[in-house]
Image (spheres, grey):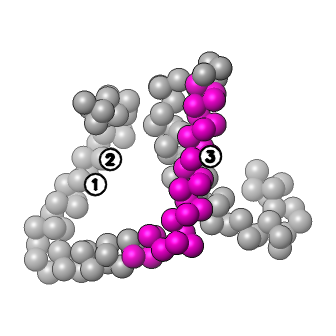
Amino acid sequence: MALMNFYNLLNNREKAILIWILLLLISFLIVKSTRKIILSSVLSILKILLSKKIIIPFILMIVYVSLLVFAFFKIGFWNMSMLFITIAWFFGSAIVSWVNVNEVNKNQNYFRDAI
């Protein structure tokens, strides 16, 4: 049910991109030679992403953003039609900014340059 609600939030272009990604993934998994490479790569990436140095700050960031979204929802500044945009922002701009957080100490004009 929740998956259909998410799918209904997407526009036609986003639905097409999602379908193409799924078709490519399925085709890569069907071919035996690429399946082995993809599975080993995915396992390596998961091993890195689930390390304590990455997963704990990531979870804290998810909690922080969730609390902000909830607070904005309660005061009427956010609604469910903004869910996809919020998720796209989180996995786009927010994570890129989080990865580049060390640049703030190196560059005095970091925030001005980021905008």
Query: Which numbered disc covers residue 64?
Result: 3
Q: Is residue 55 magenta?
A: yes
Asked whether the residues under the numbered discs 2 and 1 touch, taking CB atoms below 8 Å apart as contact, a structural biologist would say: yes
Residue 68 point in image, percent of width and height: 63, 37
| Other residues around mark 2 within 10 Å, as few (<14) / some (14–19) / many (≥20) | few
**Residue 101 appears left or right of 39:** right
Query: Which numbered disc covers residue 76?
Result: none
Which residue is at the far top? 76
Q: Quadrant of residue 26?
A: bottom left
Q: Quadrant of residue 105?
A: bottom right
Q: Secondary structure at mark 1?
A: helix
Residue marked by disc 2: 17
Q: Is residue 62 magenta?
A: yes
Residue 21 point in image, percent of width and height: 28, 54
Alpha carbon separation for disc pair 2 and 1: 6 Å
- The residue shown at (60%, 43%) is 65
Q: Which residues are magenta?
A: 47-73
99 up-or-down from 37: above or below:
above
Residue 111 point in image, percent of width and height: 81, 56
Query: Which numbered disc covers residue 21?
Result: 1
- The residue shown at (32%, 29%) is 5
Q: Main secondary structure of the magenta part?
A: helix
